[in-house]
Amino acid sequence: MKKQLFTILTILFLLISSAGAASAVTHSPSLVHKKGAMAYQHTKYLSEKIGQRVMGTPGETAAKTYVHEQFKRMGYKPAEQSFTFTRKGKDYSSANVLAYKQGKSNKQIIVGAHYDSVAIGKGADDNASGVGVMLEVAEVLKKTKTPYSIVFVAFGAEEGGLNGSNHYAKQMTAKEIDNTIGMINLDSLAAGDKMYVHGSAGEDGFIRDQAVNISKKKKLNIGINTGLNPDYPAGTTGDWSDHAPFDKLGIPFAYFESTNWEIGDLDGYEQTEEHGGIWHTENDTLAFIEEAFPGRTEERLSSYSQVLTELLKHMNNPSLSN
């Protein structure tokens, strides 16, 4: 009886979430023109209305439905890429949500952010913020002619081992890999002391370099890890987020995150001087972040949204233009 009641409640929860998702964030003209405002509303809905989005739970499914319905509302034709995986002897199911935007070229850029969270806090920073920025940029660019085609991807089950991005990368054909000029990862954008964009080493770091140039022109203070830790040379990062599977395929990447690479072990894990790490703690709520750092979330979301929008509108791959 308890199992039947749980099943009924789960179905009702998903039906309510699905019905509300399409209309949850409907943007007025004033909101659309205020940079970061749409990203903030998405971040708020995912973290406060849905809350925890742990892999394999109704919360993760509700977040997936929300992203799907938002892409649909914008005029995209979203698709879901289902996958299964095993963690600590238990089988899980999840899905990536994809929306494709045709560009002037059939060469493509992948823009991704994971929508799941851990089982503590509400995942506002990690990673409702990244999904929020991705959804805003997808909406802003819907009718804009971009130089390359764009695949927007909301990854499932990142917290359990990059499962969504690993699945996506593994199913890419050699032709698709060759056709992909880069991958841009958005993860934990709201809380950290500083704004960063990391990237591939050497010439493959062109996406990061162009993002930094845009930031400088707009005076938005998105910089690079300056390389205080020799394990992470200037401008680079580790393999702990959804850019990693694409990097392994040889696809150039850029990775936006807010943290502080100048404190603690100089590895980016301590996000703030005042409160340490926010991600994966009870402090990862919009209420705490806004109380501890007034105005920070809005500034971060606005800055990343502006830079990513301009980057996708004007990106140039030097290897293709030579």
Image (cartoon, helix red, strand yellow):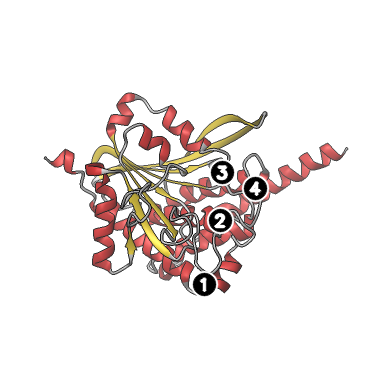
Helix, strand or loop at label 4? It is helix
Q: Amino acid at mark 2?
A: Trp
Residue corresponding to mark 1: 293
**How far apart in space, not on screen, are marks 2 and 4 (Cα)?**
18 Å
Location of residue 78 with respect to 295 vertically, above or below: above
Point out the tag, 2 or 4, that comes first from the N-terminus: 4
Q: CA distance from mark 4 to mark 3?
A: 14 Å
Residue drawn 61% across the image and 33% down it: 93
Q: Which mark is residue 159?
A: 3
Residue for badge 4: 59
Q: Earlier in the sequence, mark 1 or mark 4?
A: 4
Dot 1 lies on which element? Answer: loop
> Which circle, 1 or 4, is nearer the viewer?
1
Q: Secondary structure at mark 2?
A: loop
Estimate how packed mark 3 is, as few (under 14), some (14 to 19) or many (20 or more) residues with alpha carbons within 10 Å: many
Instruction: Using the image as rendered, state which of residue 44 and residue 165 is in the foreground.
Output: 165
What residue is at 37 percent from the left and 64 percent from the top? 303
Q: Can you give x and y, in whole percent of width and height, for residue 316 in the image?
A: 20, 47
For disc 2, the neighbor class at 10 Å (few under 14, some 14 to 19, many from 20) is many
Labels 1 & 4 near each other (Cβ < 8 A): no
Left or right: 48 in relation to 42: right
Tags 2 and 1 touching, CB below 8 Å: no
Q: Which residue is mark 2?
A: 279
Where residue 140 sits: x, y (%)?
36, 57
Query: The residue under label 1 is which amino acid type?
Result: Phe
Instruction: Identify which residue is drawn at 61% across, 45% down.
Output: 60
Q: Tell which circle, 4 or 3, labels the residue nearer the N-terminal end.
A: 4
Specify the amino acid type for callout 4. Gly
> Callout 3, which amino acid?
Glu
Q: Is residue 226 visible?
A: yes
Mark 4 residue crowding within 10 angstroms, few (<14) / some (14–19) / many (20+): many
